[in-house]
Amino acid sequence: MEQTLFYILAAVTVIGTILAISEKHPVHAIVYLVTSFFSLAAIFYLLAAPLIAVFEVIIYAGAVMVLFMFVIMMLDLGHPQDARRPGLLHAMPALILADVTLAALLMMLTDHTVPAIVAPVVSVRDFALTLFRQYGVAIEIISMQLLFAVVGALYLGRRRKP
Amino acid sequence: MIVPLQHVLILAAILFCLGMICVLIWRSNVIMLLIGIEIMLNAAMLVFVGGANQWGMADGQIFALMIMAMTSAEVSLALAMVVYLHRRRKTVDVDEFRELKD
């Protein structure tokens, strides 16, 4: 049951991403990407990471994508007829490069088998204990980084006197 | 583990390559380029969460959380810079942004 669900969600994620990156209209691309992130959040839930799944929905599908949408609407970029989709000739190097990378990764992944071990499920309590006991310094650094991002965004976004 | 770790890793590899295609193709629109970076970071998060589930350690999930915080900082700065450059140049073409100073 859960196995089938995983493969269905994986298919939804991949198809949503393909539709998002081939869409000319930026707003439609964002909506496809939100679909893809929702199914990825469900995959995280199936992989016993409920907290990451919730954060994926709140931060990615919620905050980050809405920020993208906000910038697209503020800069008035939602005109697909203005968008220059690159031709196949332009896209060819990128496709070849990505195909080579994907083939190398798949070859590496199918060569080595990972032994299936029975591991304890990570509970939210384990997660919180490890986060605040072992990685307390990392939390401080991340919060500093977010503060710097806010300051930088304010600096870049301020109105200059003409 | 409901599915073998390899299948999770294959899904992550496919997503990463899709993000890479998006970054390399959409040079005419910086918003789509940033979306490609998001897709690649999500693939990295999937690898971390799959590893955390495989070995039963919380560390992988914590690094997924770190990636999320890093991404939100990166996106806010990058979009602020897009707004700034759009005010200057009236375009979102990456090739027009060769220099920050005009």
Image (tube, coloured by chain):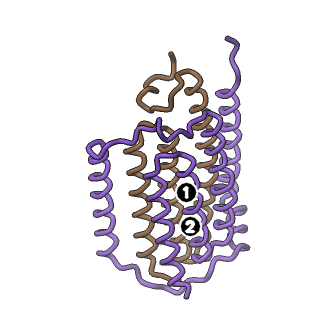
B14 left or right of B69?
Answer: left
Nearer to the camera, A7 or A111: A7
**Where is residue B1 shown, x and y percent of the image?**
53, 82
A75 left or right of A113?
Answer: right
Q: Residue at x 46, y 71 (%)?
A: A11
Q: Chain of mark 1?
A: A
As drawn, the label of residue B26 is none
**Where is residue A39 shown, x and y percent of the image?**
57, 68
Amino acid carrying label 1: it is Leu
- Give the crowd class for mark 2: few <14, some 14-19, many >=20 residues within 10 Å: many
Instruction: Identify the residue position indicated by label 2 in the image.
Output: A40
Q: Quadrant of residue A160?
A: top right
Q: Is B60 rendered above or below residue A100?
A: below
* The chain in brown: B
Instruction: Identify the residue position indicated by label 1 in the image.
Output: A33
Q: Colour of chain A?
A: purple
Amino acid carrying label 2: it is Leu
Going from N to C along the chain, the mark reached first, 1 or 2, is: 1
Q: Residue at x 35, y 79 (%)?
A: A113
How far apart are the two marked residues, 1 and 2, measured between alpha carbons? Answer: 10 Å
